[in-house]
Amino acid sequence: MTGISLEELQLATRNHGMPLEALRYDVTPVGLHYLLIHYDIPAVDAGSWALTVGGRLANPLRLTLADLGERPVVELKATMECAGNGRARLDPRPVSQPWLNEAVSTARWRGVSVAALLAEASPLDDAAEVVFTGLDRGVEKELEQQFQRSLPLGDALGGEAVLAYEMNGAPLPPQHGFPLRLVVPGWYGMTNVKWLESIEVTDRAFEGFQQASAYRFRLDEDDEGRPLTRMAPRALMLPPGIPEFFTRARTVRFGDVPLTGRAWSGHAPVAGVEISDDGGETWGEAELGTDEGRWAWRSWTHVWRPAALGEYVLCCRAHDEAGNVQPVAATWNVGGYSNNSVQQIPVTVTE
Amino acid sequence: MTGISLEELQLATRNHGMPLEALRYDVTPVGLHYLLIHYDIPAVDAGSWALTVGGRLANPLRLTLADLGERPVVELKATMECAGNGRARLDPRPVSQPWLNEAVSTARWRGVSVAALLAEASPLDDAAEVVFTGLDRGVEKELEQQFQRSLPLGDALGGEAVLAYEMNGAPLPPQHGFPLRLVVPGWYGMTNVKWLESIEVTDRAFEGFQQASAYRFRLDEDDEGRPLTRMAPRALMLPPGIPEFFTRARTVRFGDVPLTGRAWSGHAPVAGVEISDDGGETWGEAELGTDEGRWAWRSWTHVWRPAALGEYVLCCRAHDEAGNVQPVAATWNVGGYSNNSVQQIPVTVTE
């Protein structure tokens, strides 16, 4: 790996992944949930805040937190992963937030159904997309902007998207979008606009920076690419044994080693997880845990019996019911997105 | 800066600083509090957990969470900073967790007084030090170990150290030491052992790795050095204006610019904060906010009036009542500790 630059480090010290031992939690404790903040966390006064729902609607709305609280409550356990997870393992490395494996977590979100709110606002016949605008403001490619993303109207009306005002049973913390954020289960993290200011229904495709320029899977600079949408399947393993502080190299005692982890896919339910102790040459089946809902990661377990003392490379890979499977080698792309190549954990088995 | 290595990046994606816009909060929201975890976050079952208080004591103790809850409650607002804050700004860069400026936060801790608990346990006449052992286990310098640090008995009995079971009004989150941690106000972060398993009173100086080898301020490899203890004075500024996503370069609109930030020192109360807009050539006085207690950072404000459009480098520096002042240039040291050289924020003032 070529050295990480100061700019990348500035992002890495602000944002953070989920330490992989937190794979033990079905629902990630708030401060361990991964975090990617494009600009700054805005200061929002909940008392004066209100959400504007406008555009191609028969019944535009303006909703305070109290107004939202009066509407039917929906709750959702959802796994969320940054589209850039795995970026720093690509070579050459696309420069941006340098994630390794750890930009994924699961939370319980509580709020109002996007589909129900839009139905209440009555989209006009020419409505095509729904643009979500956050209060976070900054500059990208010399363009001053607020963070904005859109959903096709069909996805907004047909899916289980939530306008969430609670996370894990408490009001949203500032860094997760207080007072209101979008959560679109199954989609990569950038979809889930934080610090919502407005929802605008439009009659055409949204061409904002974060939609038309960023978050596209492009094989080279000339490739128009395709937009990132749903999370590709991935399994992660809770690193067994104990770490060396600096290298994070793992040491495991000889004997039966219980391996555990989680797996998810935004495309279809997880169908299985496989385990390898030789870096992906040979594979065995792990046992899937209880299904905790379509949008939450699935736990898996496997008892590993190393044949002898020595060095191993543990791997896990998921496949989903739509036939998607994790690749051993990543497909390089310009933005460094969607690298779901299998995790590799070198371990030393000692007496 | 030479490039950050994979090992440093692995630490930077696990641990995290406080995004500097969170300087706006008097008490840092939990998930924004900086985090440095040496090994892995241990899984602790609060039901079977108990704290052992042993060693050179007339009345050794074994205390469950319920036992601790029956004792008088103490509460403390304390600013905590990693001893390695500023490490990545040293040249050549000592390799470890690569902090820039952001490894500091403030929390409200609630628990039991260390002094009162030790008094209850009655130290014997030869008692000299108090060794705190955490449940976090790993390898450092080829030595398998649990994280351990000691305090001289005088500091443990005479100070305001707390065994905290609550942070910001809720049980400790896993990553901050659930179910019990040490908080020694005014001292650098490594002092504040998390996931406490035992307290051992000894009749001699503790020679464990984290005390005798790590966390010493050494000018070169031959220097025995001095132990890191109390936090050196530092002021930080909430970066004004808006950031560019990748470079974090700041743009500020021309006019009066309200600057705010926080300052602290473990040695003595903050006596003043100065501001510069020319990279530290000339300085003016900031106004200190309300004193929120001896161990909490002090807010400061200053209205900056840039003379013209263009480029500036904003700086702030604190001095304390003991006469300590932040240096403009850092003193290089082997471990990369205690770099409290002044923060520099380049800003562009535009129309």
Image: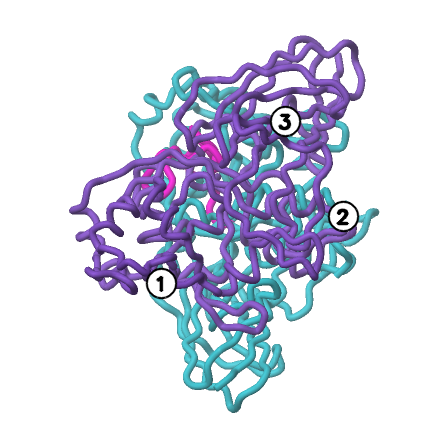
Chain colours: A cyan, B purple
Query: Horizontal and vertical percent for residue B30?
Result: 42, 40
Residue B203 belongs to the span the image colors magenta: no
Horizontal placement of B193 versus B89: left or right? left
State how far apart marks 1 and 3 are (Cα): 40 Å
Label 3 in the same subunit as label 2: yes
Q: Position of residue A114 (x, y in %)?
A: 43, 34
How dense is the environment of label 1, judged by Cα within 10 Å: few (below 14), some, or many (20 and up)?
A: many
The earlier-in-sequence mark between 2 and 1 is 2
Helix, strand or loop under label 3: strand
Q: Is residue A168 magenta?
A: yes
Q: Which mark is residue B91?
A: 2
- The residue positioned 76% from the left and 53% from the top of the image is B3
Quarter of the figure that contains the N terminus of chain A: bottom right
Tell me the residue at 44%/40% (across/down): A161
> Is residue B261 depicted above or below B112 in this figure?
above
Instruction: Read off the magenta span.
Output: A162-186
Return the residue at label 3. Answer: B317
Q: Same subunit under labels 1 and 3?
A: yes
Q: Amino acid at mark 1?
A: Thr
Q: Nearer the viewer, residue B227 or A197?
A: B227
Q: Earlier in the sequence, mark 1 or mark 3?
A: 1
Q: Secondary structure at mark 2?
A: loop
Give the Cα distance between marks 2 and 1: 39 Å
The residues bearing labels 3 and 2 have C-alpha atoms spaced at a distance of: 21 Å
Q: Which tag, 3 or 2, sits closer to the chain's start?
A: 2
Count neighbours of disc 2 (C-alpha within 10 A) and say few if under 14, some if 14 to 19, many if 20 or more. Answer: few
Mark closer to the observer (2, 1): 1
